[in-house]
Amino acid sequence: MCGAPSGYHHRAEDGGYSDKELRAAPSASELQPGQALVRVSAVGVCATDVELYDGTMGYYHSGLASFPLVPGHEWAGEILALGPGALDPRLRVGQRVVGEHCTGCEPAPRCNVCQRRGGLLRCPRRKETGFFGRDGAFQTELVFPAAQLHALPKQVTDLEAVLAEPLCTALKAVRLADVDSAPKTSAGPRVAVVGDGAVGLLLLQALRWRHSARVLLLGARKQRLQRARELGAE
């Protein structure tokens, strides 16, 4: 995504196949109230992005979403400009941020569904970054609602920050699981994680952090299993 002429930026737009195009970069003067302009510094490739590429993702078969779109829902970037009304004191130009995957109603105030815990995924007017309603981060610059941006601490790198979205998935799974009722040992609860992918490895770390759990991780890839052992799996 490098080398675009001044005033333009690259977008990897998926029309069911892999397409790449050059479009005029969004301008700070075009920002709507509550929006932020972000320069994308790092973006991850999730398994669902692969499904977007090969046309197998369920959202498109069900009619919930359609092509073309710009994928990329695991990302980090730097704020270039803030539109009017973007008054969150934690955000400023130059701030490094990540963005929420599902953004619910815009602009604020959110509807009654959005305001419930976990309600964003049930909002009938929700937008899911990189899937439907909002272009994702496979582009050099991104317009995003400031209210759904989160500032990054200095000690977290951009590449580490890309894992924030799948880490949320892991943390929610740990919260929903009744870990306290798991078989106890003198070293803490014992829990099995099935799968050695990114979320599985993040689950391993979340379980050890939240519950000091002994974790047995099941997988088939030697390199991933070795990494799991390094992270404390049995």
Image: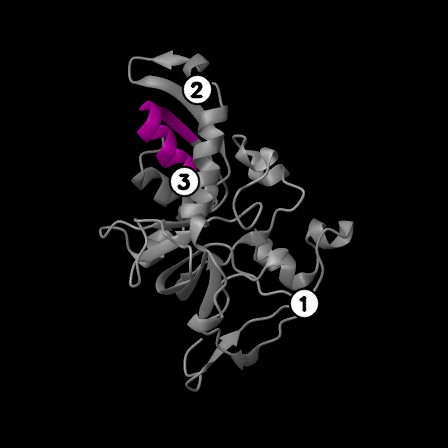
What residue do we see at 35% from left, 49% from top?
A: 88
Q: Is residue 120 above or below residue 23?
A: above
Report which quarter residue 60 is drawn in: bottom right
Q: Is residue 46 above or below residue 81?
A: above
| Residue at disc 1, secondary structure | loop
Q: Which residue is mark 3?
A: 202
Type of the residue with mark 1: Pro
Part of the protein shown in magenta: 203-216
* Magenta region, main secondary structure: helix
In the drawing, does residue 31 fall left or right of residue 111? Answer: left
Q: Badge 1, how many Cα within 10 Å: few under 14, some, many 20+?
A: some
Q: Quadrant of the N terminus?
A: bottom left
Type of the residue with mark 3: Leu
**Gap between marks 2 and 3, in whole Å?**
16 Å
What residue do we see at 49% from left, 31% from top?
A: 173
Towards the viewer: 37 or 49? 37
